[in-house]
Image (cartoon, rainbow, N blue to C red):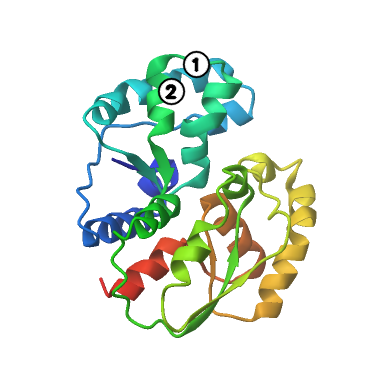
Amino acid sequence: VYFHGCSTQHYEPWVGQAAVAVLEHNGIEVILADQNCCGLPALSNGLFDTAKDYHCRNVRKLLPWVKQGYDIVGTSTSCTLTLQEEAPELLDLYDEDTRLVSQHTYDIFEYLLMLHEKGELNTAFRPVNKVVPYHPPCQLRAHRMGLPAIEVLSLIPGLAIHRSEAACCGIAGTYGLKSEKYKIAMAVGQPLFDWVKDENQPLIACDSETCRWQISAATGVPSVHPIALLKEAYGI
């Protein structure tokens, strides 16, 4: 079950198209189930009743698929972390239905790496002769699953991934979108922006949508979800 999240649904449909194409190229049936916002924007701004309503509605919509044996795979590190951990913990939701949805939710590169470790990932990649700076966003690191995008992309011949060591892009979800926090957000992200400019490459990869938008707005360098590079390597 592909959990597209609000950003893919409303702003970056090509991320979802790439994700579905890559999964189907690996022989995986993809279901676009009914879903709504994961609730993180509400949760981050103290609107706990709204966030709980969003999360519980998602659990009701996704649970029947989980009970049929489907996994839930998302391309937004924020959405998947919210379904897995943040909403259940911060909203004190520990019922069996919430636990089942949490246990069967994966970030897309976490899922693809799991396939590779089982010998089930299609590794018939075309060469991609590029140097791509890559920033692992804070929400990805909060998953505590390492850097699966780098592990999977390292399988592509010709592709060189340069990892950022910067702490944060500064956007912090909706934090840096607020006029009173904008200067702070830009100051936090400045080391990353400087690094991107020093890399002097035509694009940068990052798993988080708000981080991508922040980086591109600050540097003028187009940003992509790493799944776009995998789609290119498959030639689809």
Q: Quadrant of residue 152?
A: bottom left
Secondary element type, mark 1: loop
Secondary element type, mark 2: helix
Q: Which residue is mark 1?
A: 94
Q: Which residue is mark 2?
A: 99
| Above-or-below relation of 27 to 80 | below
Decide: few, some or many residues near mark 2? Use Cα within 10 Å; few <14, some 14-19, many ≥20: some
Circle on res. 116 = none
Q: Residue at x 25, y 71 (%)?
A: 236
Q: Position of residue 87 (x, y in %)?
A: 53, 26
The amino acid at mark 1 is Tyr
Residue 63 or 15: which is nearer the viewer? 63
In this rendering, would 14 be left or right of 195? left
Q: Pointer 1 and pointer 2: residues touching (CB < 8 Å)? A: yes
The amino acid at mark 2 is Arg
Q: Position of residue 36 (x, y in %)?
A: 37, 31
